[in-house]
Amino acid sequence: MVVEALEARPCAIAAENALGMLRRYPQFTISPAILLALLAAWWLATDVLGAPTYVLPRPQDVLRALLGGLSRPPWDKASYWYHAGITMWEAALGFAIGSALGALLGLVLSHWPILGKSWYPYIVGFQSLPKVALAPLMVVWFGFGLEGKVFITAIITFFPVLVNMMAGYQAVEPERIELARSCNASELHLFTKIIIPSCLPFLFAGLGVASVLSILGAVVGEFVGASAGLGMLLMQFTQAMEIAQLFAVILLLAVIGFLMNHVVSLVERRYCFWAQRSNATART
């Protein structure tokens, strides 16, 4: 019995280590497994079950179209790099403008409740308007240039940052404010040392959502009228029924959205590290 227990112990240790690896690094273990499962299901639906190519193209056709578009130089107007750069520039500008306005207005409306109660219903009503319906109006106001795409992207990214900033302001503990005031802290110190740091985790949560929505805003603006951009390519491929190229552009948009969200996460780890540590401690 002792020999069997000793032989079983290394297996138990190996299984425990493997389980610990899965828990600590799911992005390197579980995420690739999910990707392989999705690719296998895709291949099964197209090559085995015989799904029509105009409904679901084969993975190899999409990969061939993607590599064909990325193999061209960035200055070539037929290259995916060229159109992706334009879409990313529109998304980045709109994201920066909308996020800055959302964070600033969120602080103002939360600091002065009378302004918040007065303006918040109108902000919510404006946000509830379908952005696709506003896109033609952007063309009338700004034309087919960069300004219209940036404007509609800023509108889409504005609201998540605003709401999260207001939630972060309201989540500040009143006891901390009272303690700081009892120590003769000025309003500037209250704002910079207590309120802003407490709002940062909520702000980055809103920025993470807004970073993905910025790609949506740029593409919606390009749907209405554009001479370049991934949204314009989507419209062209849809009209020409080039489904493999259409899927290639959709995959490229998904990668761009993931990268923008990842950049926000990296900035959060740099400037909001205490929230990361508290979450890790809670999980432990």
Image: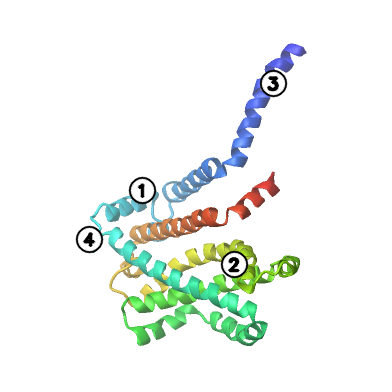
Q: Amino acid at mark 2?
A: Thr
- Residue with the mark numbered 1: 60
Q: CA distance from mark 2 to mark 1?
A: 54 Å
Residue appearing at x 46%, y 47% in the figure = 39
- Residue with the mark numbered 2: 192
Name which of mark 2 and mark 4 comes first in the sequence.
4
- Viewport quadrant of the C terminus: top right
- Residue with the mark numbered 3: 9
Q: CA distance from mark 3 to mark 4?
A: 60 Å
Place of residue 166 in the rendered image (x, y in percent of width and height, measured from the top left): 63, 73
**Display coloring:** rainbow
Residue 232 horizontal side relative to residue 50, left or right: left
Place of residue 31 in the rendered image (x, y in percent of width and height, measured from the top left): 53, 45
Quadrant of the rendered structure where residue 189 is?
Answer: bottom right
Q: Are marks 2 and 1 in contact (CB under 8 Å)?
A: no
SS assignment at label 2: helix
154 and 104: which is toward the camera: 104
- Viewport quadrant of the N terminus: top right
Give the number of the mark in front: 2 or 3.
Answer: 2
The circle on residue 75 is: 4
